[in-house]
Structures are given as structure tokens and as C-alpha cells.
Image (cartoon, rainbow, N blue to C red):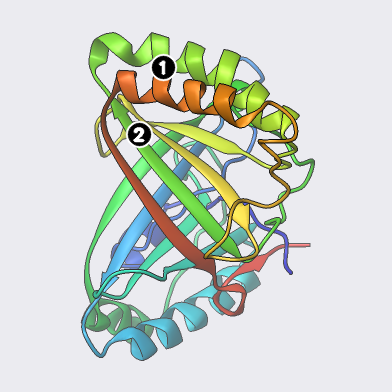
Amino acid sequence: MKKSHFAFKGIVLISALAGLALSPMIASAQEDEPGRIQVRLVNVKSGGAAGWESAIGDAAGVLQAAGMPFLHVYQRIRGDTPGYTIITADGAYTDLPPVELDSGVIDRLQNNGNGSTVVSLAVLAELGIDSGSLEPSAPFLYVRVRTVAPGNADAYIAWHRDELTPALREAGLPDLRTGRVTIGGNTNTFVRYAFTDDVTGGVNGLDIPGTVGQREFDRIIAREAELLSTSEDYVYRFREDLSFTAE
């Protein structure tokens, strides 16, 4: 599988890709600042999936040839409306070469698309588990979106850092990526990513009963519920055929 994480810059591209956004959970160039990522959630018209995929595949080829570091496409595998997430580095924080896309490619993206939402995240490395690689550890991606009341944000970060992340690390989770919304949504929304081989099963390598214990883990999760305003879970499949990572 090609190396992956989340990264992409807008420059001319955000507008040129007609709502195509991207985002990587990469480390910041400055250690005292969080890494920044950008995520675009794209809906596709009924019957437009093949045309949109063809267009984004062509766009990926142009971006790769221009020297973009990577572009990663995930497909939503649940729900009636075709949906994709495009992930790359935040253009406001990463210098990338300008790119011009053929107008036909742009038209195909627009004509087959059905709206999109762009969100920028600050990567919270202290809440994650570093796998030591940008490569996805499995073909499916679980995304957990958690929003807290403004007064609970600090408590949520402390809970995640001091309870959830250590428990998941002890249970053997090899790769956890966590970010906080900074632009495009509620800034008290946190997003965490984990990978799995089987969309119907648990996250890879996780042994809660044999390590931290199911009762203790249930207590930890119950504490999260006390802090939340809303929660949503999504499952995506990595589309390696529509993605690339520079060597």
C-alpha cells in the first residue's frame, strides 16, 4: 500500500478542484505549534460516482507530476449518497508548487459533485499514538467525531491524554491520530482516526480484555460520554487507486 496520512495545499488548487480539499495529520515544521491538516468531505450526485472518480484520478496524476507530496482519497462505505473524504496538508501552512488543472477535469468534478464541506484541524500529537509511518495501517478507516460544550474542552483533552490514549496504547493500538477543528466548524469538535482490516470487526491489534480490562475501559468511555454534546462515527475505505504519495 502507498504511504499515507493526510496532506495537501490549496494555493490555486482549492478553487481549481472545485471543492476538493485535503488534509494530512503531519507534524508541524515548528515543534511549538501543532501540525495543521485540511479535510474535505465530498458528496457525489446519484449516478455520478464513476465520473467523479475518473476526474479525481486524472487530477491526482497532474498533482503528482507537479510535485505535490501526496493526495489521499477515502470512500464512505455506509449511507445512500456516495461520499468521499480527500485528505492532504493544509495549504496555509505548507509551501507547494502551483498547479493548473485542465478545465475538462474541473468540469467533471463539478458536474458529478453534489456539494462539499471543508474543515481544518490542528493535530494534537499528545492525544495520538505514533505508528512511526505515514502509511495507513489497514484498508479501512474509522473516524470518530466528538463535540463538547465550550466549558468541557480542557477536561476532554485531559481525559483523552491521561486516560483514553494510555489505555489504547496499553491495549496494543498501533496508530491513533487526533485533531481539533480550527476552521470550518465547531472549534470544540475533536476527530480521531484508527484503522482496521475488517469493516465489521474491531480496530487492529486491540486487546482491551487482556490488558486494561473491559470494566476499566467501559469506565473510561463512560467518562467521555459525560463530557460530550454530540458524537458521530464514520467508516471509510482507502482508495489507493485514486491516491498517491511522493517517494
Q: Can residue 55 be seen in this view?
A: yes
Which quadrant of the structure image shows residue 32? top right
Q: Is residue 28 visible?
A: no
Q: Which mark is residue 146?
A: 2
* Separation of marks 1 and 2 at Cα, in angstroms: 10 Å
State the residue in front, 138 or 66.
Answer: 138
Q: Residue 156 carries which label?
A: 1
**Crowding near the residue tagged with mark 2, few <14, some 14–19, many ≥20 C-alpha atoms within 10 Å:** many
Query: Of the residues shown, which amino acid type is indicated by label 1?
Result: Tyr
Number of marks in picture? 2
State the residue in front, 214 or 121.
Answer: 214
Whether pointer 1 and pointer 2 mark residues with C-beta atoms closer than 8 Å, the reply is yes
Q: Which quadrant holds the C terminus?
A: bottom right
43 above or below 36?
below
State the residue in front, 129 or 22.
Answer: 129
Instruction: Measuring from the top left, give residue 6's x and y in whole percent.
Output: 56, 50
**Crowding near the residue tagged with mark 1, few <14, some 14–19, many ≥20 C-alpha atoms within 10 Å:** many
Left or right of residue 46: residue 245: right
Left or right of residue 48: residue 165: right
Q: Which of marks 1 and 2 is nearer the N terminus?
A: 2
Secondary structure beneath label 2: strand
Left or right of residue 217: residue 18: left
Instruction: Measuring from the top left, give residue 193's x and y in whole percent.
Output: 53, 45
193 above or below 169?
below
Q: Which quadrant holds the N terminus?
A: bottom right
